[in-house]
């Protein structure tokens, strides 16, 4: 039997929130960083951004991930207050799962000996911080002294052990132990304290806050010894800070869209060494919300999710940026641009990203309006999109720039868009019927007696198939601007969700919400491949390979199934768990590579190996 294996993952970006920092982490030994998006925890190698692996075992949205000091274990936390500790390699065996707080966990840290974990966040009552043994979950200390959500915590990396916490009550609390007990508290900040970090040698720690200040303290006694000078300082909230491996410098990021590298003197005062500007358009999305100094990499994350990497040894060198989707991907199309195969994926927040196989992320489309996107179709050098209003946009494409265009009002929210490749005739399905567009003009509106869910148009623009809510397929011939019903095909037992013509137009495939797909012969209108019933939930999308031999279906059950036309449906290739939460887009790059996208905001390339 043919097989499919994962060739590339174009990972999603960290989930961010306006007005809050994100605390990303890494493993210096393998140059890996970890961050969260939805229920997934993503690991990426900084030297090879296409090397991404994803952990999806949390039942709720994941918030933070940390590698143990020896790099063998990972502790990940979620919004329900649960921490999972699991093996990083092999089958990722779960070591332990603890319910640590009654609310969201915002930060967690391992002790340097890898035996204890401290976690903080939101909780009911007074418990905003807990430290426990990693193998048994037993408490190691009492953490009182906070009255509101605790945003960050840090474990001193050398003995004697200390824990520092900070949060929304403007306090910085210092605990000695183990067992840990309250020692002293600072109220030097006048706004939320967003992040606290010890220097790797344990001699100092820094706190940064939304009051634009960064303060430095003695690591052993907890006394304040210095601060970052305000005259060179940030002009907005500081969301995160990270120390250099030699404990002499600190990287900070802020809502003022800059990152700064500071030298920290022996007496604890800071001196600005360099201000880093991340490339961007200058909008809200360029506010910087997270950072990590790992070996020679300075990793900086913006509110829009773009990850920018500077080299610490050569700050003049222009940085590398990569990005992707933050929200669930709703559609995926493949098109040729300048002789090169390009994949476009769109997410409902209105972002369209371009990917090239082998390279990964090559940029986002720069659009005039950033309205939401529900449907996306592409043809040649043009894309057609529709959102949640009654408008359809036909936009000319020039690399990653979108040309100027006017929206077309089709009178109702579009359910789907299909384009005839040869004639550029577009068929838009709306609840009550279908609308035909030639260029930017509506040439006909056809009211139909049944509820329309989706439609397809043949490549030469002479025939259309319209899917109905009752599972029937209506075939129409098109001449000029009129549709004439030719036949009704009845085989599906659920609402039609997708219809697609084969590239040579000799067949078409249809899929329904009752998990069945059917391939039809276009001439005889007979079923060509039957019993395609191997999904366990609604089928969302389907695609044909360029040689008309393979049909791929993607479903809500998280899997992708590829059928070969000249073999029975039971000889399928199944890719289980392709996307956490469901698959919403499939497209073929060539005869043996398939691209899929889904709810987890990732795009994956699968290589199909014939026997």
Image: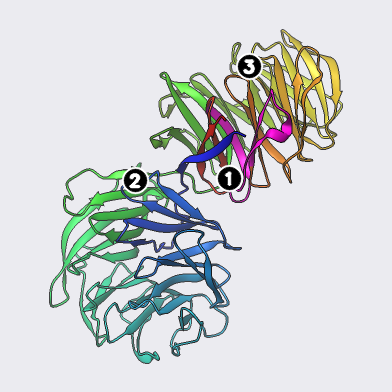
**Sequence-first tag of 3 and 1:** 3
Residue drawn 44% across and 90% down?
A: 141
Q: Where is residue 529? Give x, y as percent.
A: 75, 26
- Label 2: few (<14), some or many (≥20) within 10 Å? few
- Relative vertical location of residue 371 with respect to residue 155 in this rendering, above or below: above
Residue drawn 52% across and 85% down?
A: 126
Task: Identify residue for label 3.
Answer: 420
391 with respect to 128 (left or right): right
- Relative vertical location of residue 128 with respect to residue 521 in this rendering, above or below: below
- Front-most of 440 and 122? 122
* Badge 2 element: loop
Task: Identify residue for label 2.
Answer: 48
- Label 1: few (<14), some or many (≥20) within 10 Å? many
Q: Verify whether residue 360 appears in magenta.
A: no
How far apart marks 1 and 2 lie (CA) works out to 21 Å
Task: Identify residue for label 1.
Answer: 578
Q: Where is residue 398? Give x, y as percent.
A: 42, 23
Quadrant holding the C terminus: top right
455 with respect to 305 (left or right): right
- Front-most of 572 and 482? 572
């Amino acid at each position: 039997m043919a097989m499919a294996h994962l060739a590339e993952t174009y990972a999603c970006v960290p989930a961010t929130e306006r007005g809050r920092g994100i605390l990303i982490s890494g493993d210096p030994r393998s140059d890996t960083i970890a961050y969260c998006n939805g229920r997934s925890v993503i690991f990426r190698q900084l030297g090879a951004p296409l090397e991404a692996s994803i952990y999806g075992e949390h039942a709720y949205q994941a918030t933070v991930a940390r590698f143990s000091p020896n790099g063998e274990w990972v502790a990940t936390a979620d919004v329900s207050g649960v921490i999972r500790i699991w093996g990083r390699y092999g089958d990722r065996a779960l070591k332990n799962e603890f319910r640590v707080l009654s609310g969201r966990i915002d930060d967690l840290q391992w002790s340097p000996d890898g035996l204890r974990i401290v976690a903080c966040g939101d909780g009911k009552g007074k418990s905003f911080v807990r430290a426990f043994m990693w193998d048994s979950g037993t408490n190691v200390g009492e953490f009182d002294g906070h009255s509101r959500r605790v945003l960050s915590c840090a474990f001193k990396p050398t003995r004697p052990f200390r824990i520092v916490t900070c949060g929304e009550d403007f306090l910085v609390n210092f605990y000695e132990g183990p067992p840990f007990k309250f020692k002293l508290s600072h109220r030097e900040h006048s706004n939320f304290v967003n992040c606290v970090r010890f220097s790797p040698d344990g001699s100092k720690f820094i706190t940064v806050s939304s009051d634009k200040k960064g303060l430095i303290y003695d690591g052993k006694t907890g006394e304040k010894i210095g601060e970052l000078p305000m005259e060179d300082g940030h002009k907005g909230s500081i969301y995160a800070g990270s120390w250099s491996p030699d404990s002499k410098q600190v990287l900070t990021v802020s809502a003022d869209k800059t990152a700064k590298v500071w030298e920290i003197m022996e007496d604890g005062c800071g001196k600005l060494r360099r201000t880093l500007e991340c490339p961007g358009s200058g909008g809200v999305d360029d506010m910087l919300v997270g950072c990590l100094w790992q070996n020679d990499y300075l990793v900086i994350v913006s509110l829009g999710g773009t990850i920018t990497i500077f080299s610490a040894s050569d700050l003049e060198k222009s940085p590398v940026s990569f990005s992707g989707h933050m929200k669930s991907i709703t559609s995926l199309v493949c098109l040729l641009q300048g002789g090169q195969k390009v994949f476009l994926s769109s997410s409902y927040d209105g972002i369209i990203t371009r990917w090239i196989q082998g390279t990964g992320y090559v940029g986002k489309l720069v659009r005039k309006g950033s309205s939401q996107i529900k449907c996306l179709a592409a043809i040649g050098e043009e894309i057609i999109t529709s959102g949640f209003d009654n408008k359809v946009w036909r936009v000319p494409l020039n690399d990653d720039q979108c040309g100027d265009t006017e929206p077309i009002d089709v009178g109702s929210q579009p359910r789907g868009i299909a384009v005839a490749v040869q004639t550029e005739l577009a068929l838009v399905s709306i609840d009550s019927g279908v609308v035909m567009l030639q260029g930017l003009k509506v040439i006909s509106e056809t009211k139909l007696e049944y509820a329309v869910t989706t439609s397809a148009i043949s490549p030469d623009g002479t025939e259309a198939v319209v899917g109905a809510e009752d599972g029937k397929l209506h075939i129409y011939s098109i001449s000029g601007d009129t549709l004439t019903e030719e036949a009704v095909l009845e085989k599906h037992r659920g609402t039609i969700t997708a219809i697609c013509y084969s590239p040579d137009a000799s067949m078409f495939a249809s899929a329904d919400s009752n998990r069945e797909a059917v391939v039809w012969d276009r001439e005889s209108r007979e079923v060509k491949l039957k019993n395609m019933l191997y999904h366990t939930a609604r089928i969302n999308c389907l695609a044909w390979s360029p040689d008309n031999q393979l049909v791929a279906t993607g479903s809500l059950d998280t899997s992708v199934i590829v059928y070969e036309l000249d073999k029975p449906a039971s000889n399928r290739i199944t890719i289980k768990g392709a996307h956490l939460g469901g698959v919403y887009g499939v497209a073929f790059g060539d005869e043996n590579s398939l691209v899929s996208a889904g709810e987890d905001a990732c795009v994956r390339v699968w290589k199909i190996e014939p026997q």
